[in-house]
Amino acid sequence: MNEEKITTSANKKLSPEEIKRVKGLGCLQDKRYDDIFNIRVITGNGHITTNEHRAIADAADKFGNGQITMTTRLSMEIQGVPYDNIEKTIAFLGEHGLMTGGTGAKVRPVVSCKGTTCQYGLIDTFALSKKIHERFYVGYHDVVLPHKFKIAVGGCPNNCVKPNLNDMGIIGQRIPKPDSEKCRGCKKCQIEKSCPVHVPKLVDGKLYIDPEECIHCGRCKGKCPFGAVPEYQNGYKIYIGGRWGKRISHGQALTRIFTEEEEVMAVIEKAILLFKNEGIAGERFADTVKRLGFEYVNEKLIG
């Protein structure tokens, strides 16, 4: 393991205005020094090429202390960059197609789980989060909001990336469509056996899946040898108003499941613009939803 290079501070005093300016570029002051910063490099949902990795590593060696860390939003931070190296670092990264940022009252870097490749993933999380990143992180970069706005994409109800604790979260769904005529009322129902939350039941000798209790994980697909659940509808559940931190807020699911990707993109845009136009400076989206009322916001987004 490589040792961390010694961070050398010139003890240069910076004005609060300058510290705020470079923070807006994704450069956060190391609290131990007056003029040492950690620079956030945007990965775009945590997906990054080997060439980009090499460029970030080279930047850390050339301009920082040789150390790189990951943030909770899957950005990479080059550690120990002296103030005088900030512009050189950003320019070097730009030459390799990389950008810095991820701070401020705007759409933050999008995060996603590995649903594209995970055995439980129900949607292409990499592709969807990339589209969201391009349209709303890059495309809305100059749109100032009342507070930061975080978006997460999860591939299934396992909820690994905690979409419901983000300002807006998308979770892949696979909705079963039972056919009672094909159910033979087996004593050991394979649909019932395969459900991780024990929702399917035999009622009067026929399979019943409570639509309000089913989490739409799709784990029962293909389990019945007689095809009692012949069809499944893939879709997206959207949560709004989540937040972690000192005041945790569990997001609420919008009152319909969306079946098209473009519907999801349209809802995200509506949510961001509603937050921009009806939010109050300094409040998170969770507070906006609570103040305006979930029913009002839900209608605005799905209407």
Image (tube, rainbow, N blue to C red):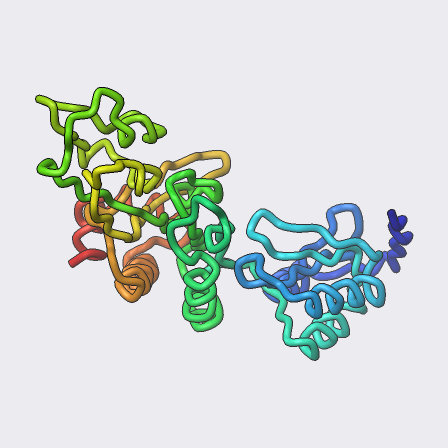
Q: Is residue 20 left or right of residue 114?
A: right
Residue toward you, 235 or 69: 235
Determine if residue 168 is in view. no
Residue 11 in sight? yes
Compared to residue 58, the image places residue 251 above or below, namely above
Task: Please report the residue visible at 17 percent of the width from the left and 53 percent of the height from the top.
Answer: 299
Q: Position of residue 143 (x, y in %)?
A: 42, 68
Looking at the image, residue 279 sits to the left or right of residue 59; the answer is left
Q: Residue furthest bottom?
A: 95
Residue 279: x and y, percent?
A: 32, 54
Residue 181 location (% of width, % of height) = 9, 37
Q: Position of residue 125 (x, y in %)?
A: 44, 56
Is 227 displayed left or right of 154 in the figure?
A: left
Q: Nearer the viewer, residue 105 or 65?
A: 65
Q: Out of 1 and 110, give the one closest to the viewer.
A: 1
Question: What's the residue at 56%, 58% (across, down)?
Answer: 103
Location of residue 124 with respect to 92 vertically, above or below: above
Q: Quadrant of residue 158?
A: top left
Going 29% across and 25% down the picture, which residue do you hit? 198
Number of on-image labels: 0
Q: Quadrant of residue 49?
A: bottom right
| Horizontal relation, residue 56 to residue 200: left or right | right
- Which quadrant is the C terminus positioned in? bottom left
Residue 165 figure quarter: top left
